[in-house]
Image: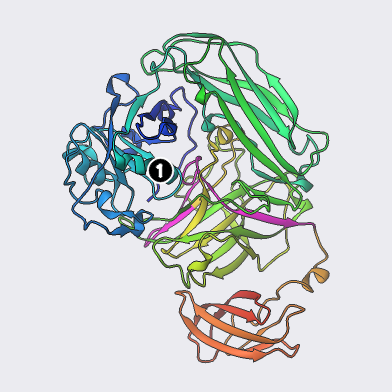
Amino acid sequence: MEKLFTLLISFLILNSINSQVIFQVTESPNDASLLGVYDSRWADPISSGYSATPDMTNSGNAIEAELVFAEDATTFGVLDPNANNNPSWQDACEPVINDLTGKIAVVYRSFCWHDIKAYYAQQAGAIGVIIINREPGTFGMGGTTYASSITIPVVAIGSEEGDLLKAQIAAGGVVAFIGTKIGLHPNDMGTSKSDIVMAESFSNPISLSQDSSELNLDLGLWTYNQGSNPQNGVTASVNIDFEGNTIHSFTSNPVNFTAPLGIVVDTQYIDLGNFGRTSWQSGVYTITYSIYPNIADDDSADNVVVSQFKVTNDNTYSKSRVDVLNQPIATSGKYLWEGVTSYDDFEVCIQYKNPNASRLNATGLTYSCTPVGSSMSGELLEVRLYEWNDVFSDANDPSFPAPASLWSLNQIGSATDFYIDESESGVNKYLEFTESPISLNDNQRYLFCVYTSSDSLQVGFDSKIDYYATVNNYLEYSGPVKTLATGGSSQWYAAGFGFETTPAIVAHFDFPTNITNYESDKVLIPYPNPTANLLTIPLRKKVAGKVTVEMFDLSGKLVLTENSLLNGAPLKINVSAITNGSYLIRTIFSDGTQDSYKIAVNR
């Protein structure tokens, strides 16, 4: 299970402790293009629970050795669906049988806890462990079976990095360094994607972004001196480009940085002002942050960081990145692992608040899911819209609701969908709220959410965007997550799965519309609901020909199916033989379009 974060992460001097510990390929005899530093995450003692793992922020604990795949006693040739169909005998979920003495073991993430993999590799003589994720992006590591026995460093990398390296690792001779950057080079200023202030949201509706009073960017970054020498006269700059043209440029005054003192690094925030436009245009804007040391940098790879945001002409809103069609980009999926705790449901959300929210109506959400294992057929989910009515000024307000408290939420929108089969895996799907269009209030906090009680669905997330410094700047959470443990009560995690990954959800809006006119083009609501015996389904205009009606219970079981020929009248469905409960009705029309409704039978 991914680690869920309950509190706002304070920006302390050592906030970049993980980014100071690097995974760097130093030798690759057959492919020099693989040399360099890779995105990674170190399992530090506090977050992982590996209390005996060495402090890799101490340069004396750095290691450098050949990378070698660990091999356990699992049948050779079997691929593991839990490990992105990578070799199951290389996930170290069983005792390792090859000699790893003096090597850095490489294993695949799969079904067992990370401490088990590290322990078995350690028992085979490994001096460090690299865990390749089954999806893009890094992840937090944990486990309790052998946590206190792990005495070697453990590092996670994403599946994309693993795919680049695995062939050459198997060929042999690839050497890597794991350790701190502090003092590694004499002159080494740096920053990272988690240290820059981005736009508060990636997609910003143009109707709410008219000028600088409505969309105004805070600009700045945290930067630090990792080299052994002091650095004087360092400057930072920001450039904003739109359609190939620079529309804003600003450079800071010179800043002086002291040399590191042990593991304490001089870290300073460089304020680069604000930026707004007298008239925003729709399209993609690129923000480039650059650091300029006064002395040539020995490792300039972390001196430039780029982010983007978008002003959308179709009034879509997102925290995740989107493609040219304003569809969310999901690089990974999240679900709740039930190896220790059983869950009834979970919910992933994006927060929305705008001083001019009443200009637009909410209509629905776009999202994607992938199967946890190999099947997602018949799995259900809902999209929901809540008013978030807890009273607090920002994330630092002591009145901010506690994680285990009942957040004050008023649900004002919902719709239900289900997955036909695996052909819909990773496909972006738009689901309109049954109550659409939903009017909104200025300065009201809202949560746009994807809810599921299924343990077979993982909801799409974008792990290529990091809101760490941005949330700490604007003090508004980006992607809260709720869980409900079996027999327990709901628990909200305001920081979700961490600021380095955000729900790949797009919220859709339209202009306030006369309800009478709008109803003529939208799917109408079945009635009566709840129903006892006879359910009437009004049909939207322009559908004709044959229709198939399917009724599913909440486990995805088909309980009723009927075929009819449309004659312009509403459909009548006899549900007298159906037991009391909640159901999903799906209507499939001859033109290939479908509508779904959530109904209840109660008599």
Q: Nearer the viewer, residue 166 or 132?
A: 166
Task: Report the coloring of the rendering.
Answer: rainbow
Q: Position of residue 98 (x, y in %)?
A: 17, 44
Q: Count how many numbered circles sit on residues in the image.
A: 1
Q: Residue furthest front?
A: 30
Residue 486 within the segment the image draws in magenta: yes
Q: Is 548 displayed left or right of 363 in the figure?
A: left
Q: Amino acid at mark 1?
A: Phe
Query: Toward the viewer: 321 or 523?
Result: 321
**Viewer can see residue 490:** no
For numbered disc 1, what is the local secondary structure? Answer: loop
Question: Around disc 1, counting alpha carbons within 10 Å, would you say few (fewer than 14), some (14 to 19), or many (20 or more)?
Answer: many
Q: Is residue 156 above or below residue 384?
A: above
Residue at x 29%, y 49% (from the top left corner): 113
Quadrant in the picture for residue 64: top left
Q: Does 561 appear above or below 21? A: below
x then y, percent, for residue 263: 37, 18
Residue 169 is situated, as x and y percent measured from the top left of the image, at: 32, 40
232 up-or-down from 465: above or below: above
Residue 29 appears in view: yes
Residue 496 shown in magenta: yes
Q: Which residue is mark 1?
A: 139
Range of residues picked out in magenta: 482-511
Identified at 64% across, 50% down, the residue is 323
Q: Is residue 523 above or below residue 385?
A: below
- Residue 29, image x, y percentages: 34, 31
**Looking at the image, which is closer to me, 567 or 85?**
85
Q: Is residue 503 left or right of residue 141?
A: right
Res 60 quadrant in image: top left
